[in-house]
Amino acid sequence: MSKHAASGRRRAETTAAPLRPRTAARSTAAPSAGRRRAEPVRRPLGGSAQKFAITAAASGLVLTVALPTTAAAVDPVLPPEATAAPAPVSADPNATLEFDRAALTSKFDPDAKLQGLTVAGTDVTPAAAKGTLATPLDSELVETSSFGYRVSPITGTAGELHTGQDFAATCGTEVTAAASGTVKSAGWHPYGGGNRVVIDHGNGVETTYNHLSAISVSVGDELERGHLVGASGTTGASTGCHLHFEVMVNGTHVDPLGWL
C-alpha cells in the first residue's frame, strides 16, 4: 500500500463522527428547521344542536352521514297568557238545556218475553220471569198474605200451603188479566177459590183470579194484557174482600211476586 493511501484512510477514520443512539430526549426534541411534523387532526366535539357530517365522494356520488347530537332539549318559552288560568264560564241558571238522543230506542215487550221463556217444571228463575206479568189490579198493590206455608186463617191449621199472593182490595175493584192468553175456566171453584178465572198464557204458564164477586169473561175468550176479568170479592174460603192471585208453571204453584 502506498504512503498516501494509508494516510487518507487514517484521516477518514478520524473524521467520521460516532453514531449516537436515539433517546427519549431526542425523540421529544424540537424538530429541525428542515422537517415538519404532521399535526394531529382535531375534530370538534359536541355543541348546542350541532350535527357532524361525514362526506365521502365515490364514483361521482356524495354520501353524507348525519350524527345525532347529544345536546339537551330546551323547553320553549311560552308567553304569559298561554300559562294563565282559564277564565271561569258561567251560564244563565234559568236557561233550558236540550240534548238530542240517538235514533235508537228499545221497548220492553213483556208478552214476547213471556212467550220466549223455556219452562221446565218450576225451574224458571225470578230473574228470567221478572216483569213478564202485569199487576192484576189497577190500584196500588197492598200485599197481605204471601205465598208459602202459613197457619190457615179459616181452620187454624199450621203448615198449610198458601198457593198464591193476597192483595188487599175492596169488593168490586176491577181485576185485569196479567198477560194475554186464553180463558181456560171461568166459574165456581169447589176447593175454596169461590168465583174463579184461569187464563192459559202458553208455555205451561197459567194465572188464576180467585174470590171474585163477578166474572166478565167466558171459557175460550182470547184476552189481551189488561183485559177486564171481573171484580174482587170474598166468595169461597175467604175472610174478607181481597184478590187471591196465583201463578202456575206446568201445574205447579210458584210465587207470583217473582213474575210481577
Image (tube, rainbow, N blue to C red):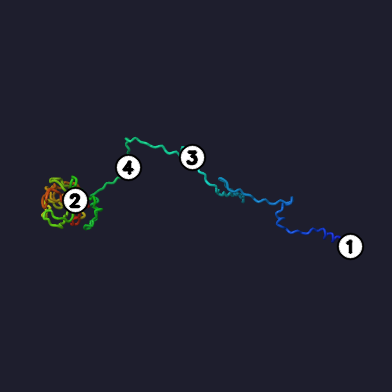
Q: Earlier in the sequence, mark 4 or mark 2?
A: 4
Per the image, the residue denoted by label 4 is 101
Question: Which of the two labelled residues, at mark 1 and mark 2, occupies the earlier sequence position?
Answer: 1
Mark 4 burial class by Cα count in 10 Å: few <14, some 14-19, many 20+? few
Instruction: Please provide percent x and percent y for residue 31.
Output: 72, 52
Q: CA distance from mark 1 to mark 2?
A: 159 Å
Could you say whether the residue bearing mark 3 is in a helix, strand or loop?
Answer: loop
The residue indicated by pointer 1 is 3
Residue receiving disc 3: 78
Cβ–Cβ under 8 Å for marks 3 and 1: no
Q: Label 4 sits on what residue type?
A: Arg
Residue 61 in picture, x, y percent from top left = 60, 49
Give the alpha-carbon distance from disc 4 to disc 1, as whole Å. 134 Å
Look at mark 2 in the image and give the residue it sits on.
181
Nearer to us of marks 3 and 2 is: 3
Instruction: Indicate the amino acid at tag 3.
Output: Leu
The total of numbered circles placed on residues is 4
Can you tell which of label 4 and label 1 is closer to the viewer? Answer: 1
